[in-house]
Every structure is written in structure tokens, then in C-alpha cells.
Image: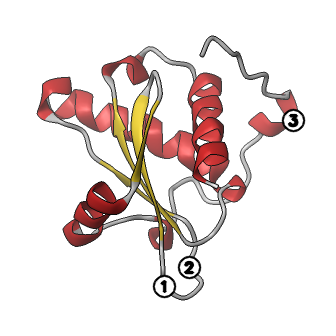
């Protein structure tokens, strides 16, 4: 998997709200558990993603983030989550509706560039469909 993604400079401009919208978040522990148990597991160099097709009525794609304590203290874990949320927010329109995706980041996220994170998210998108 040494493929490199090339992101055109036109995609790097930010448009819209600067946070992940609340309807696009997984907040309940039951949804996290269900995604872990029934979803498919996709491993990348920056994170592990669990993808589950939601059976509900038409809903936007929802993302959840879990950071284990092994990654570091709260400051480090929160920084990792902020980086992942921003990368997801920039790629949000590319994901189809009715999916629940839980992302479990790895420590390498701290050194990764946003273009690389967005590239990995697009790979997850291609595999989830």
C-alpha cells in the first residue's frame, strides 16, 4: 500500500462550518458497540475503521472516534481526535448516506499530513461502498 494520493490544491479550500455537524457524529455507546460487532474492519497505516451500513431510514453518514489510553495522555488523545475530525470534515461530502464509521486512530496520525489522512479516508470510502 505505498500508493500516494495527490490532492488538487482546489480541494484544500475550506467551505462550510468548521466543526463536524452533530448529525454526523456517533454519540451513543450502543452504536459504537454495534459497529464494532457487526461492522467490517478496515486497517490503514493511520487508523482502523469499522464500517457498518445502517438499516435505518435515510440518515447522513455518521462518524465516531475512539482513542485508547495507550496513545498517550488526554492532551495527546484530544489532539489526535481533533486532527481526525478535521480530516473527516473535509471529506464528509464524499461519503454516502446510511453508514456508521468508527475510527480508531494510531499514533502515526500525529505526524501525518492532512493530505495523507484525507487520502486514507478516501480509501476507506472506496472499500466501504
What is the quadrant of residue 100 in the picture? bottom left
Horizontal side, residue 1 vs residue 7: left or right? left
Callouts 1 and 2 close, C-beta under 8 Å: yes
Image coords of residue 78 (percent x, y): 28, 38
Q: CA distance from mark 1 to mark 2?
A: 7 Å
Name the residue: 65% across, 25% down: 115
Sooner in the amino-acid sequence: mark 3 or mark 1: 3
Horizontal side, residue 30 vs residue 91: left or right? left
What is the quadrant of residue 123 in the picture? top right
Residue identifier under label 2: 59
Q: CA distance from mark 2 to mark 3?
A: 28 Å
Q: Of tags 2 and 3, which is closer to the observer?
A: 2
Image coords of residue 85 (percent x, y): 46, 46
Residue 72 can be seen, yes or no: no
Quadrant housing the N terminus: top right
Image coords of residue 47 (percent x, y): 41, 32
Q: Is residue 90 above or below residue 109?
A: below
Quadrant housing the C terminus: bottom right
Residue identifier under label 1: 56
Q: Is residue 36 above or below residue 61?
A: above
Q: CA distance from mark 3 to mark 1?
A: 35 Å
Horizontal side, residue 27 vs residue 39: left or right? left
Name the residue: 29% across, 69% down: 31
Give the secondary structure at mark 2: loop
Residue identifier under label 3: 10
Sooner in the amino-acid sequence: mark 2 or mark 3: 3
Amino acid at each position: 500500500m505505498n500508493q500516494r494520493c495527490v490532492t488538487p490544491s482546489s480541494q484544500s479550500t475550506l467551505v462550510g462550518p468548521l466543526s463536524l455537524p452533530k448529525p454526523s457524529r456517533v454519540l451513543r455507546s450502543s452504536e459504537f458497540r454495534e459497529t464494532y460487532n457487526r461492522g467490517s474492519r478496515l486497517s490503514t497505516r493511520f487508523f482502523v475503521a469499522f464500517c457498518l451500513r445502517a438499516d435505518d431510514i435515510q440518515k447522513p453518514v455518521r462518524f465516531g472516534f475512539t482513542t485508547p489510553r495507550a496513545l498517550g495522555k488526554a492532551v495527546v488523545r484530544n489532539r489526535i481526535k481533533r486532527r481526525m475530525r478535521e480530516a473527516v470534515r473535509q471529506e464528509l461530502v464524499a461519503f454516502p448516506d446510511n453508514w456508521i464509521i468508527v475510527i480508531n486512530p494510531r499514533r502515526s496520525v500525529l505526524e501525518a499530513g492532512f493530505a495523507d489522512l484525507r487520502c486514507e479516508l478516501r480509501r476507506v470510502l472506496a472499500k466501504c461502498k
